Image (tube, rainbow, N blue to C red):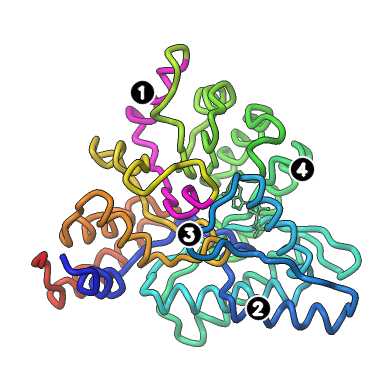
Amino acid sequence: MSEEGLRTFCAALPKIELHAHLNTSFSKVTLQALVDRKIQLDPTFTSQKMTFDGNETAGIEESFSKFRQIHMVCNDAHAIYTLTHDIIHEFAADNVKYLELRSTPKTIPETGLTPEVYLECMLRAVRDCEEGGVDTVVRILPSIDRRNGVDVAYKTVDLAYKYAQSSNGVVCGIDFSGDPLVGDAADYVPVFQYAHSKGLKLALHLAEIASFEETHKVLQGTTVGRIGHGTFLHQCPEDYKDITQCVLQQRIPIETCMTSNLKSQTVSDYSSHHLEYWHNRQHPVIICTDGKGVYQTTVTEEYVHAARAFGLTRLKLWQLSLQSIDHIFADEATKQTLRRKWESIKPSFDFKDR
Ligand code: 5GP
């Protein structure tokens, strides 16, 4: 398949994005505007580089250092609204027809941000995009940051539940993320059970690093909706072999973020990415970006990388995007609408690999 033909095909493909963090999914244009505004408000502010450009890679700690920088810029209602609004338009331009955007609702007294204000900014942007005719269905997952402890986590679940009721289902689940080197995911199992009892779906970052003990406990104690990254799920030592079995048997979908994993050095190259392991076992995988801004990628690019690395045909790429619909957190009616959309577009596609 020619590089250009493949990229054109992947760009035109209708796609699903299920693993996008708000503060790491900026475009360079939006980030620059927000940095300029920050400097106007605080002339002493100096910005550092917040992206991995080209083939740049660094350990996972460097990603978290960049996230801290971004949070210094995106720390008020204007920034949260602008990010959400622009990111939805950018995914729409990349033919993403359904987007789940996740973010940690923050308390920042200096700028008046509370978790409620934070979520309302995101919801307002979602509404404005919908009213403006953007052809992308958007859902929001408030994130639990594992650095903030269990008490804050319970509050995030209560907040998500409250907004799930009042947003007509736009808020529909919870993400669990934050620095995997900090704290123990197993401490959050009661929080996950609580969220599940409230009808909230759970997308959990698990086994991003070789943290088998906590991964095992979480899988034993939780109804996991989807796993983020799951980089080490298939590389368990003998004592933890049932982790891999559990994921396979329960068919827990895996959100794969190839470029993010490469740039943060948890995977060495595209062709050794774990997407292949799961895909070869007909296990559900969803191709995602993680942070299209920080890692300088797009959903289209991620499909191109997957096709190149694993020799996926155009028909396979289509099936991967279509099957992703099965794993969205929105309701059955939304799934049906999306499937009909895929069916109606399909005749315009040429599936010949050349
Ligand atoms: P935010 O929640 O502020 O919109 O997005 C940035 C936050 O998402 C980070 O501070 C971190 O908690 C989480 N995050 C972003 N990318 C990753 C990742 O690759 N792994 C983990 N564990 N957390 C991430």
Tell me: 295 left or right of 148. left
| CA distance for labels 2 and 4 | 25 Å
Q: Is residue 169 visible?
A: no
Q: Which residue is mark 4?
A: 148
Q: Is residue 249 magenta?
A: yes
Which numbered disc, 2 or 4, marks the residue that appears first in the sequence? 2
Location of residue 236 with respect to 26 vertically, above or below: above
Tell me the SS state at disc 1. helix
Span colored in magenta:
240-263
Of marks 2 and 3, the one in the foreground: 3
Q: Is residue 306 visible?
A: yes
Q: Amino acid at mark 4?
A: Asn
Q: x%, y% of residue 215? A: 54, 27
Q: x%, y% of residue 95? A: 36, 74
Of helix, strand and loop, which mostly describes the magenta segment? Answer: helix
Tell me the SS state at disc 4. loop
Which numbered disc, 2 or 3, marks the residue that appears first in the sequence? 3
Q: x%, y% of residue 20? A: 52, 59
Q: x%, y% of residue 182? A: 71, 35
Which numbered disc, 1 or 3, marks the residue that appears first in the sequence? 3
- Neighbor class of circle 4 (other Cα within 10 Å; few <14, some 14-19, many 20+) is few
Q: Amino acid at mark 3?
A: Asn
Q: Which residue is mark 1?
A: 245
Q: Which residue is mark 2?
A: 82
Q: What residue do we see at 63% from left, 38% from top?
A: 180
- Specify the farthest residue to the front: 55
- Specify the farthest residue to the top: 239
Q: Amino acid at mark 2?
A: Thr
Q: Amino acid at mark 1?
A: Gln
Tell me the SS state at disc 2. helix
Q: Which residue is mark 3?
A: 55
